[in-house]
Image: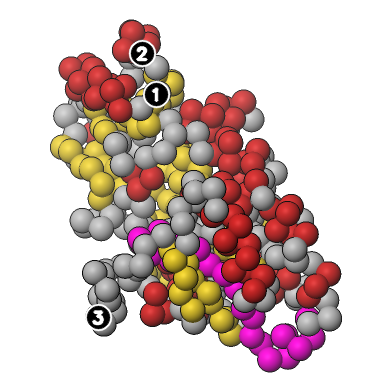
């Protein structure tokens, strides 16, 4: 970060900073970071990138550049060259494949003077494998749903808990290929399908109700300091927020009249929720993170039970920023320019709902 020491005073005085943000299209967390930066206390010049020229948000950044996919051999060199030539102070990842590349390259990018808010590979290794996530939580003494990894159909001979949720152990972003099963017949049918499409999947006990589902952000600085947390009690009530729902035929009235899996598009009530936040801070802290962590959980009989962890900025980053909890802006101000950000900084309580927005791009080459 030495390159920025002489620039620090000038940039803070003008309240401007230039950053590179990848993956700004597709409705993922890159778009969320973009929206949050536009609400930041600093004025951001944003160099936005995406793998496609047909990017809905290209007109919302100061400069748009098409980059190859994160799996392409030239990806990292092109990103690094772009960030340095544009004199960016930070690089934000906007997709999970890019997150993995930047995590491995973090030291080299920091040697170039670039701030990269991404968690270490060890954190990603746990959180990007749902079975490893549950095993880690159980080993740390946290409550989890009953779970088991399935690699062969015969593994299910020892599984008795229904209803249950089936999902790929790795991948499955946006709740893709996630199924609710309530009978042995459904279990075997969806298990055969998943084993034909992925190497392994996790089966988890279905817990609680969708009325008590939370998405919880826990914010850590680059030095591992816990800065704050925020919880959103989800409102899961429409096509944007419901991935799958089926009538509850399990004979378990405590699970509600319908069994629901939410999408990655969250909305809801931002409030203090102290018990939820405290539990999720302990869960996130067990990973020794160096960037934001997002915990998905339900509250069952007063207990906070996590069912998934995302080791990155959330799909609710912009909602949080609207409430005054602006994670990307806070991290740049703190970790790049040394601004004193108070731990447990205040933010507002509010309800935020979501819809769709259109982006006219003019005439593009087809």
Q: Nearer the viewer, mark 3 or mark 2?
A: 3
Which quadrant holds the C terminus?
bottom left
- Taking the magenta stretch, the answer to whether it contains residue 12 is yes
What label does residue 152 carry, if any?
A: 2
| Helix, strand or loop under label 3 | loop
Q: Residue 245 lies in what quarter of the image?
A: top left
Disc ID at residue 363: 3
Give the alpha-carbon distance from disc 1 to disc 2, as whole Å. Answer: 9 Å
Helix, strand or loop at label 2? It is loop
Which residue is drawn at the image coordinates 62% and 82% (left, top)?
42
Q: Give the residue drawn at x 63%, y 62%.
A: 80
Residue 76: x %, y % from top left = 59, 55
Cβ–Cβ under 8 Å for marks 3 and 1: no
Mark 3 surroundings: few (<14), some (14-19) or many (≥20) residues within 10 A: few
Q: Give the distance between the C-alpha atoms of the residues marked 3 and 1, in whole angstroms.
A: 43 Å
Tell me if I can see residue 34 in this picture: no
Percent position of residue 239, x then y:
21, 56
Locate the N terminus by quadrant. bottom right
Q: Earlier in the sequence, mark 1 or mark 2?
A: 2
Q: Is residue 134 above or below residue 36?
A: above
Per the image, the residue denoted by label 1 is 199
Q: Which residues are magenta?
A: 8-29
């Amino acid at each position: 970060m030495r390159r920025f020491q002489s620039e620090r005073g000038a940039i803070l005085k003008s309240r401007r900073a230039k950053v590179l943000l990848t993956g700004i299209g597709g409705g993922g967390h890159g778009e969320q970071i973009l929206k949050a930066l536009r609400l930041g206390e600093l004025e951001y010049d944003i160099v936005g990138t995406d793998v496609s020229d047909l990017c809905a948000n290209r007109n919302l950044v100061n400069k748009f550049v098409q980059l190859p996919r994160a799996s392409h051999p030239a990806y990292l060199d092109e990103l690094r060259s772009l960030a340095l030539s544009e004199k960016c102070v930070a690089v934000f990842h906007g997709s999970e494949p890019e997150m993995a590349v930047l995590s491995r390259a973090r030291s080299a990018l920091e040697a170039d003077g670039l701030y990269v808010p991404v968690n270490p590979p060890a954190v990603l290794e746990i959180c990007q494998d749902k079975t490893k996530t549950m095993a880690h939580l159980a080993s740390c003494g946290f409550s989890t749903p009953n779970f088991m990894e399935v690699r062969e159909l015969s593994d299910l001979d020892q599984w008795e808990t229904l209803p249950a949720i089936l999902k790929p152990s790795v991948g499955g972003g946006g709740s893709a290929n996630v199924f609710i099963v309530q009978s042995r017949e459904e279990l075997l049918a969806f298990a055969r399908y998943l084993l034909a499409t992925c190497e392994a999947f996790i089966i988890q006990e279905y817990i609680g109700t969708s009325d008590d589902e939370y998405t919880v952000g826990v914010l850590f600085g680059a030095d591992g300091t816990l800065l704050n947390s925020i919880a959103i009690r989800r409102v899961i009530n429409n096509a944007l927020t419901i991935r799958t729902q089926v009538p509850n035929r399990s004979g378990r009235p405590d699970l509600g009249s319908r069994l629901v899996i939410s999408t990655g598009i969250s909305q809801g009530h931002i409030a203090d929720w102290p018990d939820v936040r405290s539990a999720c801070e302990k869960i996130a802290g067990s990973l020794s993170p160096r960037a934001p962590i997002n915990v998905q959980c339900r509250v069952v009989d007063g207990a906070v039970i996590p069912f998934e962890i995302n080791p990155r900025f959330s799909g609710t980053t912009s909602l949080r920023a609207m409430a005054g909890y602006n994670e990307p802006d806070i991290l740049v101000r703190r970790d790049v320019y040394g601004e004193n950000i108070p731990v447990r900084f205040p933010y507002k309580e509010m309800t935020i709902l979501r819809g769709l927005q259109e982006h006219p791009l003019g005439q593009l080459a087809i």
